[in-house]
Image: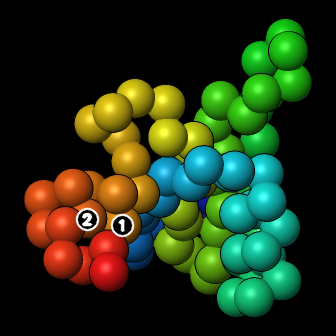
Amino acid sequence: MTVDDPFKHSSLGSGIFYKDPRAALIWLEKAFGFEPSMVVSDADGRLVHSEMRFGDGYIIVDSEWADHVARIFHVLTEAYPALAK
């Protein structure tokens, strides 16, 4: 998305957390056509933040860096163990 109007915002933005965010970036690009727009790594090469665009929307793709930031499957199966079966 080009920024012709600095006051125009994306129509949709969301965050998704993965155990392997680098693999997720590749998969999201191949499977759905998202385009990486920002990938930030730390000094050890670990991904610390990334964004992908699709049209004028974007998603943030990051890792599960804390217990309260986990994939929805982990959250749901902890709350409802029967879902894991």
What residue did someone put label 2 on?
Answer: 77
Q: Is residue 11 visible?
A: yes
Please tell me which residue is depicted at 47% across the width and 58% down the height of the picture: 16
Identity, as a three-letter code, of the amino acid under mark 1: Phe
Looking at the picture, does residue 41 appear above or below residue 60? above
Q: In this image, 11 relative to 26: left or right?
A: left
Q: Residue furthest front?
A: 85
Q: Does the residue at mark 2 contact the one at mark 1 (Cβ under 8 Å)?
A: yes
Looking at the picture, does residue 70 appear above or below residue 14? above
Please tell me which residue is depicted at 83% across the width and 67% down the height of the picture: 26
Residues 7 and 42: in front is 42
- The label number, if any, that marks residue 73 in the structure image: 1
Residues 11 and 79: in front is 79
Residue 71: x percent and y percent? Answer: 41, 57
Location of the C terminus (image quadrant) = bottom left
Q: In this image, 23 relative to 77: left or right?
A: right
Q: Residues within 10 Å of mark 2 (few under 14, many from 20)?
A: few
Looking at the picture, does residue 20 appear above or below residue 24? above
Residue 32: x percent and y percent? Answer: 70, 88
Residue 53 appears in which quarter of the rendering?
bottom right
Location of the N terminus (image quadrant) = bottom right
